[in-house]
Amino acid sequence: MYQQNSETGSLGRVVKGSWSDEEDDLLRKCIQKYGEGNWKRVPERAGLNRCRKSCRWRWLNYLKPSIKRGHFNEDEVKFIIQQHKLLGNRWSLIAAKLPGRTINDVKNYCNTHLYKKHSIENIPAPATNTMTHNTSSCVDRPESSATIKEPKWWENILVELQREEKEGKSQNCSGLDFEQDNLGQQDPNINDGMDQWLNSLKEVPNLSYQWEENLLDFDVVNLWA
DNA sequence: AAATTTACCAACCGCCTGACT
DNA sequence: TAGTCAGGCGGTTGGTAAATT
């Protein structure tokens, strides 16, 4: 028979692929009962033949009540672009500053939109070629590509940001660019510098809501104060 | 109308890190 | 100190709907 182990839940056979409504329900009830964490035991507790990572991923990216659905608005896109320029592919850090948005959302969004515009707008291309424009389950898929294509307002944002940068007008992230550019050009240990800097960001208690107060007033210089 | 291509998103994989023993 | 394990992250892939030919 199947052997029980921590990765597979009650049976040794791991289920892969799309999550069914029933599985979602089981996982949701399990988390409600036992709370988040201890993912090793979640498959067993929930009665799911999913690996712990799959359970965790499903909860964090789709089932968690705080997740914000739907399109990224202009402010969010602008913020993502700025942060991506600053932080690179550190999706978790970027997503952490966007309340309700998941790492997967941000990552997919950047990967598609920024990558597509890379050749035109000279924006550093992410490593992959996928995107998440909205968060929807595998069953319910409300946004069509046609819907997404129509406005293309995000392209305008990219153009605007680039223009502002050239003109030296980008107040909100000029400081950030300065830090990064200098590190990149002069400091061979750029990653070490960035890591140090990022660690310091974690120490700032109100960073997470600063962008909510005023996205474009995000100023790294003040973080050091 | 059918076939093909493109675009998008959900999901998985593999690696890294930190905690624990 | 080394080994193990769980959590977390970034990269990548596969399936499907939409658009195009």
Image (cartoon, coloured by chain):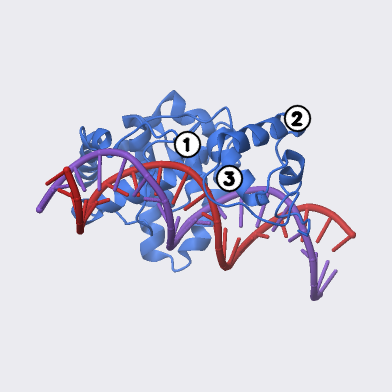
Chain colours: A blue, B red, C purple
Location of residue A161 by image quarter: top left
Residue A175 in view in this figure: no
Q: Earlier in the sequence, mark 2 or mark 1?
A: 2
Q: Mark 2 and mark 1 in contact? Answer it, CB < 8 Å.
A: no
Separation (CA) of disc 1 from disc 3: 13 Å
Residue A203, placed above or below residue A89: above
Indicate the secondary structure of the residue bearing disc 1. loop
Q: Residues within 10 Å of mark 2 (few under 14, many from 20)?
A: few
Compare residues A89 and A205 and report the one nearer the observer: A89
The residue wearing badge 2 is A33
Task: Check the residue under mark 3 and report the chain it is in.
Answer: A
The residue wearing badge 1 is A137
Amino acid under label 2? Lys
Q: Residue A24: where, in percent of width, then height?
A: 60, 35
Indicate the secondary structure of the residue bearing disc 3. helix
The residue wearing badge 3 is A57
Compare residues A130 and A29 and report the one nearer the observer: A29
Q: Are marks 3 and 2 on the same chain?
A: yes
Q: Residue B19: where, in percent of width, then height?
A: 78, 52
Q: Mark 1 and mark 3 in contact? Answer it, CB < 8 Å.
A: no
Residue A179 in view in this figure: yes
Q: Residue at x 50, y 59 (%)?
A: A193
Separation (CA) of disc 2 from disc 1: 23 Å
The numbered dot on residue A73 is none
